[in-house]
Image: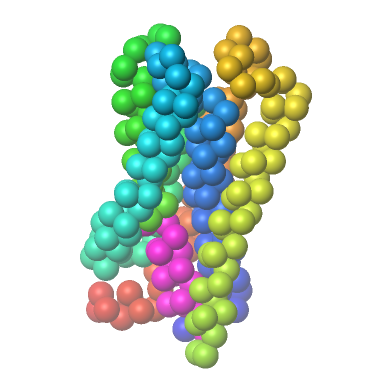
Amino acid sequence: MPSGAIRRRIILASVVGTTIEFYDFYVYAAAAVAVFPFLFFPHNDDPTVSLLASFATFGLAFAARPLGSVLFGHFGDRIGRKATLVASLLTMGIATFIIGLLPTYATAGIAAPALLALMRFGQGLGLGGEWSGAALLSTETAREGKRAWAAMWPQLGAPLGFIFANGLFLILTSTLGYSPGDTVGAFMAWGWRIPFLLSIVMVVVGLYARFSLEETPVFTKALA
């Protein structure tokens, strides 16, 4: 069984990974209300229609999450927990980073919301694989009688990601200025992209934590 130091490293990697994934997930949630209705769905005269269209793309991730769990769970049993956790982190991180680079409706027309929806679907796939995989990684390396305690740590990523994502949006809207419907201010012109682009930095941190891990004893035994 892994030593105490290895278990602590696994717990840290699990918390970091799920925090990054939920940060990406909630960054989109904030932008789905404050940004996307005005920049990606502005062709509707009724602002409520634009808001609902933005929420529809937000909801795509909830349809993709169980698919991500099935997909990454399947490959986790075939090629290993570590490899699939790296893949889920990259899926989420790349999708989030691309959102920060997307052209708006004024520039690309209908292609803009279509690409936004595709990236949101990718976020759902990544989170579905990450959350279940991180819990599996923690439980399969836990001390005997401590599996529930070990599985608790990845769940902390959800509130931590929520705090980081919304805290960053609060700082940006306060410093750059924001008012609903204003598409020419600094925040709406370029500031909203910062939380998405920062995702790539967090992914690098997460990958560093993941690559330092070893396969779980359960998977190693099954492979043998």
Q: Quadrant of residue 165?
A: top right
Compared to residue 33, the image places residue 63 above or below, namely below
Compared to residue 51, the image places residue 135 above or below, namely below
Q: Which residues are magenta?
A: 129-143
Residue 152: x and y in percent read 56, 72
- Asked whether, in this view, residue 139 is left or right of residue 198, the answer is left
Compared to residue 139, the image places residue 26 above or below, namely above
Please give the name of the residue rendered at 46% of the width and 68% of the height, measured from the top-left corner.
135
Give the mark count. Answer: 0
Answer yes or no: is residue 104 visible: no
* The stretch drawn in magenta includes residue 131: yes
- Asked whether, in this view, residue 66 is left or right of residue 139, the answer is left
Residue 42: x and y in percent read 44, 16
Residue extending furthest toward the bottom: 145
Residue extending furthest toward the right: 175
77 or 117: which is nearer to us? 117
Residue 208: x and y in percent read 53, 51
Please give the name of the residue rendered at 59% of the width and 33% of the height, measured from the top-left corner.
195
What kind of secondary structure does the magenta stretch mostly adopt?
A: helix
Please give the name of the residue rendered at 53% of the width and 65% of the height, measured from the top-left corner.
154
- Asked whether, in this view, residue 31 is left or right of residue 42, the answer is right
* The stretch drawn in magenta includes residue 34: no
Answer yes or no: is residue 50 visible: yes
Quadrant location, the C terminus: bottom left
Please give the name of the residue rendered at 54% of the width and 32% of the height, measured from the top-left corner.
33
140 or 180: which is nearer to us? 180
The colour scheme of the drawn protein is: rainbow
Q: Quadrant of residue 15?
A: bottom right
Q: Quadrant of residue 198?
A: top right
